[in-house]
Image: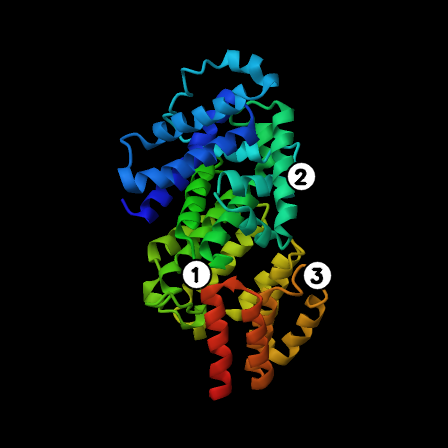
Amino acid sequence: MTDRAVEDLLRAEAPQVLAALLRRYDDFAAAEDAVQDALIAAATQWPREGVPDYPRGWLIQVANRRMLDTLRSELARRRREEHHPIEEPPPVPDRDDTLVLLFLCCHPALKPSAAIALTLRAVGGLTTAEIAGAYLIPEATMAQRISRAKLKIKESGVPFRLPTPAERSARLAAVLHVLYLIFNEGYTSSTGPDLRRSDLSTEAIRLTRGLHALLPADPEVAGLLALMLLTDARRDARTGPAGELIPLTEQDRSRWDQSQIAEGVALVTAALPRGPVGPYQVQAAINAVHDEAPTAEETDWPQLLALYGVLRGMTDNPMVALNHAVAFAMVHGAAAALDLLTTLAADKRIAHHHRLHAVRAHLLEMAGRKEAAAEEYRKAANHTASVPEQRYLTLRAARILSG
């Protein structure tokens, strides 16, 4: 098995192993540390010695030994050790506990930002640096937030089980936001040499399908699943042979996954009349407009502008305002849209984000201001840690000046 295949297997098994230890020991921080030790051991041994017949059982046994080593070394935990015989590791679960873990991480004792960060770490497998990048805050700040979240869950004494319907309702918004962020990090990786991390986006879709099966009548759950499917349908057309980024307007639409588009359109079409309409349904509708356009030139920009207007009324997310500016430019012209970016530039959440520079460059290019556009493309390249995005933006700047 290749190193990448081992990595994919470990990512899929990690939440299950963590869930098994949480059921037994009820200590989030210590259990996650033990699981990380087991994953490191597997990543070292499996490529060399081969994957065991029962990977999950192997990981649980190793993680359990690490956990018991920790328990033995702490005098205050000796009483707890007596309740969990050291000769018996937790049983290998015959079910998928990921949704249980997902709802546990979104515990009501946690602030939404902390719940989301913890879930991205424990369920999504993102590093602390990746989560910090998604939140646009320093890595050290995010590490402290995650540590505090683990401690609060431990102190709460909440059992490891699916929440009751009332508990589920209270945590659902945070769960949906977590799944959304995991998908986004997989669809467009914030760092590294690859544009996407398909393992993350695929896992986010799988988890959202499970949540939709659990809550089939919830329109926002259906909307989020539709949004993911409609976005992911374009995945194969987003990169060229060398992994280079291909923007939406230049993609070969024959490579889009029509079955995913049909499923996504059906989901959002059924969800919208049920109400209340939420941001995930609106974003799904926006992506449906893009996916159903036969060509980039036939995109219904007035409809997109109207949808972004609705979405802006639901959230103050600066990225939504940025996308609204693009739609505004396609309907009313680049010059008018550039004025909208002036206000956004004063928003600290996005003022130094590469997307703001990239959109400004695009609008300047539309307005025929080549020198200024090239400068903004170069600024955008300097503000992203994604190698494919850096290359695309740098090349775009060079092409403008040479054209």
The structure residue drawn at horizontal position 65% and vertical position 25%, both measured from the top left corner, is: 155
Secondary structure category for the residue under label 1: loop
Q: Is residue 367 left or right of residue 347?
A: left
Residue 360 % position (x, y) = 60, 74
The structure residue drawn at horizontal position 63% and vertical position 31%, both measured from the top left corner, is: 151
Residue extending farthest to the bottom is 403
Q: Is residue 383 above or below residue 184?
A: below
Q: Which residue is tagged 2? A: 111
Few, some or many residues within 10 Å of mark 1 (<14, 14–19, 20+): some
The Cα atoms of the two marked residues, 2 and 3, are separated by 22 Å
- Name the front one of labels 3 and 1: 1
The Cα atoms of the two marked residues, 3 and 1, are separated by 27 Å
The structure residue drawn at horizontal position 61% and vertical position 61%, both measured from the top left corner, is: 319
Few, some or many residues within 10 Å of mark 2 (<14, 14–19, 20+): few
Residue 15 % position (x, y) = 45, 35
Q: Earlier in the sequence, mark 1 or mark 2?
A: 2
Secondary structure category for the residue under label 2: loop
Q: How is the image coloured?
A: rainbow
Q: Earlier in the sequence, mark 2 or mark 3?
A: 2
Few, some or many residues within 10 Å of mark 3 (<14, 14–19, 20+): few
Label disc, if present, on residue 193 of the rendered structure: 1
The Cα atoms of the two marked residues, 1 and 2, are separated by 33 Å
C-beta proximity under 8 Å, tags 1 and 2: no
Q: Quadrant of residue 365?
A: bottom right
Q: Is residue 368 visible?
A: no
Residue 388 % position (x, y) = 45, 66
Q: Is residue 70 visible?
A: yes
Q: Which residue is tagged 3? A: 348
Q: Is residue 184 left or right of residue 158?
A: left
